[in-house]
Amino acid sequence: MNIDLLLRIAGIGILVAVLHQILTKAGRDDQAMMTTLAGMVIVLTIVVNEISSLFETVRTVFNL
C-alpha cells in the first residue's frame, strides 16, 4: 500500500471536517451536509479505483 493514498484520504477528511465545522457555525447546515457527502463520494471513488487496480493485479498474477 502506498502512503500517498493514506495521506490523500486523511487530507480530504481533515478538509471536509474543517469545512463542515465552519459551515455549521455559520448556520448553513444543508451546505455542511452536502460538503460531507461530497467528501465521502471523493474518498469512495479513490478507494474503488484502488480496489479495481488490486483486482487487475490479481487477475494478471493468476492469468485469469
Image: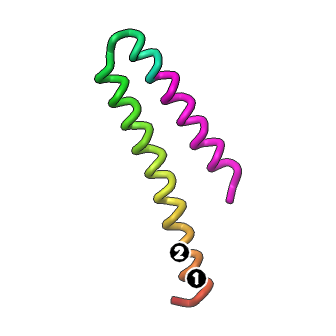
**Range of residues picked out in magenta:** 1-19
Residue at the image point whose x is 42% and y is 11% from the top:
25
Q: Is residue 11 magenta?
A: yes
Q: Position of residue 22 (x, y in %)?
A: 46, 15
Question: What amino acid is labelled 1 in the image?
Answer: Thr
Neighbour tally class for label 2: few under 14, some 14-19, many 20 plus, Cα within 10 Å: few
Q: Position of residue 40 (x, y in %)?
A: 43, 42
User: Residue 28 has which mark?
Assistant: none
Residue at the image point whose x is 53% and y is 75% from the top:
56
Asked whether the beta carbons under mark 1 and mark 2 sit within 8 Å of each other, the answer is yes
Q: Is residue 45 above or below residue 12?
A: below
- Element type where label 2 sits in the image: helix
Of 30 and 4, the residue lying toward us: 30
Q: Report how far apart the C-alphas of labels 1 and 2 lie in the structure.
A: 6 Å
Q: Is residue 63 magenta?
A: no
- Write down the residue under mark 2: 56
Residue at the image point whose x is 65% and y is 42% from the top:
7
Q: Position of residue 28 (x, y in %)?
A: 32, 15
- Write down the residue under mark 1: 60
Of 16 and 49, the residue lying toward us: 16
Neighbour tally class for label 1: few under 14, some 14-19, many 20 plus, Cα within 10 Å: few
Residue at the image point whose x is 39% and y is 30% from the top:
35
Question: What amino acid is labelled 2 in the image?
Answer: Glu
Of helix, strand and loop, which mostly describes the magenta segment? helix
Which color scheme did the rendering employ for the protein?
Answer: rainbow
Q: Residue furthest right?
A: 3
